[in-house]
Amino acid sequence: MLKSKKALAIVSLALTLALTGCGSKTTPESSSTPGTSKEPVQTTDTGSSNEVLEVSTVSPSDPYLKFDEGESFDKNSVYDAYEKDIGVKITNKWVADITQFKEKVKITIASDDLPDFLLVNATQLKELTEADMIMDLTELYNEHATEETKKFLTMDGGMQMKTATFDGKMMGIPSSYNPFQYQTLFVRTDWLKELNLPEPKTMDDFMKIAETFKAKNPGGTKEAFGIAVSKNPFSNETGVTGLKAFLNGYHAYENIWMEDGNGGLMNSDIQPETKQALAALQEWFKKGLIDPEFAVKDVEKAAELIYDGSIGMVFGASWTPAQLAQGAVKDGKVVQEWGAFPIPSADNNPTLNQIGIGVDEYYVISKKAKHPEGVIRLLNHWVQMTLNPTEDQKVYEYGKDRVEKGANYWLLNPLRVGRQIDNNGEILPKAIENKDESILETTDQKGRYARAMQYLNGDASMWWEILISGPKGAFSLAPEIQKNKQYLQNKFYGAPTPTMADRQEILTKKRDEVFFKIIMNQVSVDEFDKFVEEWKKLGGDEITKEVNEWYKSVK
């Protein structure tokens, strides 16, 4: 989830997450370290010596990060606190706008000009490993990571750590998050009430609501549509205005590996259910329920139709209410009411919410780094603050005054890992409904509870937190999904296979091109069948073979 990883997702997420940002823990699993059986020499490296270690990194400049007067990426209270508290001096090799950050990382890797540590994706992790540009962290992690850190990063039994392991060597630190984060359907409940419409329980309900919202245009705008969609609707980076959840409602899934019924794995993109979902989306488009210009609008541009009242439904991640607040709260008043609902199903079978494994990016350390142990100090300190924060450590969350002022100082922390398991859905709705903070377990929960209480006490600016954490918020839907196992987790958690690394980008580009043409009614839905054959020839069959070889090896 910190997922940050995702351009707009980070922007919006910045509004919703506190320092610990990824939920709460349950009982930690084994703290075994991948790739080594060596006993730790010591596991208390939190910077107790007087030596200051300098480490360089690269940083995205986020529009929601606001510095106090006189501060900048080069000099700020968060970096100062790291130097003072654990003896690690952080410098930036470069800072880039968040929209350009990933492209600049690619250039940095291609030019062999790495900082001491940086965040990369899974493909880049593999490429850097094969190019011998990054450090084998096995011994470094084993010797310098605290036991607390090791337990924190293996709550899931070590699955996420395995994804960073090549030939028994730990090559990266997973930027972990809780994979059990579900997509939600958000609907204008004030419009449902105004138009006497039922809550959406099925895909038929969903379409009827969309058609009514368009026909009646309760927002009184120039033109209304049924659902918000942007130009990257199937991308992992689209946390709001995406269509993954729509696919899930038809028992179709975006690029995950699922059981084929014969003991192997198959890719979800080429299954018949995906064709059915695309046929439905084409019908939505033909009825004018999808903005005809969606294919050229980024998330922010597409979301403007939500803010101005042209659209009253959107699929999104749990933090989506922070995005919705830009239109829902005006001049200190709530002017749009929204509700959170499970993804409707196209038939009598429950929708399975697709999820990943909770990691898609990794912190890597350059082989040229002079003080790699400084990076592990940063990791240990972050985990300690997540689990047992002190009052003074609020500086890492809020800046030097240690007071929440909407500046999103937590984005300055250069190395962040999240909880792999949380119980926010069980705890927060009860605590908020009963105004009982005694059951809160984590810093994140306490921060969310405090914001919810602010809203209930009249502060409309905190409206979004109620829609996330309240009794009928997005989190409240998670326990039932979890209990009934109404989710489908990607079965492939290995490093990208050779053909995947070489061909996946091409396959994804081809898929999106065909899917868009189908949705926009430029070609028949039967074009999907041609895409399947082309997918197989362009490398899909070879990837499937490699994935199944991996699957056999881990069974």
Image (cartoon, helix red, strand yellow):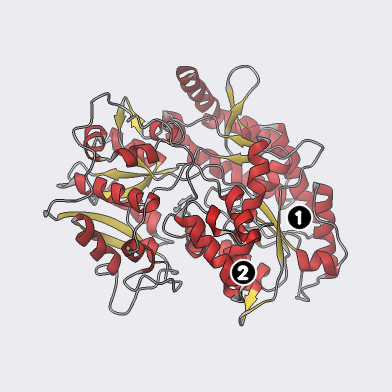
Nearer to the camera, 309 or 103: 309
| Kind of element beneath mark 1 | helix
Q: Residue at x 80, y 47 (%)?
A: 203
Q: Give percent across and percent down for residue 311.
A: 72, 66
Q: Give percent across and percent down for residue 4.
A: 45, 53
Q: Residue at x 50, y 65 (%)?
A: 15
Q: In which quarter of the image is residue 223?
A: bottom right
Q: Is residue 424 left or right of residue 383?
A: right
| Kind of element beneath mark 2 | helix
Nearer to the camera, 275 or 380: 380
Q: In this view, does 405 lie to the left or right of 429?
A: left
Q: Residue at x 16, y 47 (%)?
A: 371
Q: Which label is found at residue 285?
A: 1
Q: How many labels does the image show?
A: 2
Q: What residue type is labelled 1?
A: Phe
Which-is-in-front pick, marks 1 and 2?
Answer: 2
Q: In this view, does 431 lie above or below 26?
A: below
Q: Is residue 107 above or below residue 212?
A: above
Q: Which label is found at residue 373?
A: none
Q: Give percent across and percent down for residue 94.
A: 27, 61
Q: Is residue 48 left or right of residue 263?
A: left
Nearer to the camera, 544 or 396: 396
Task: First in sequence, mark 1 or 2: give its number.
Answer: 1
- Residue furthest toward the left? 51
Q: Which amino acid does label 2 sit on?
A: Trp
Q: Mark 2 points at which residue?
A: 463
- Residue furthest toward the right? 196
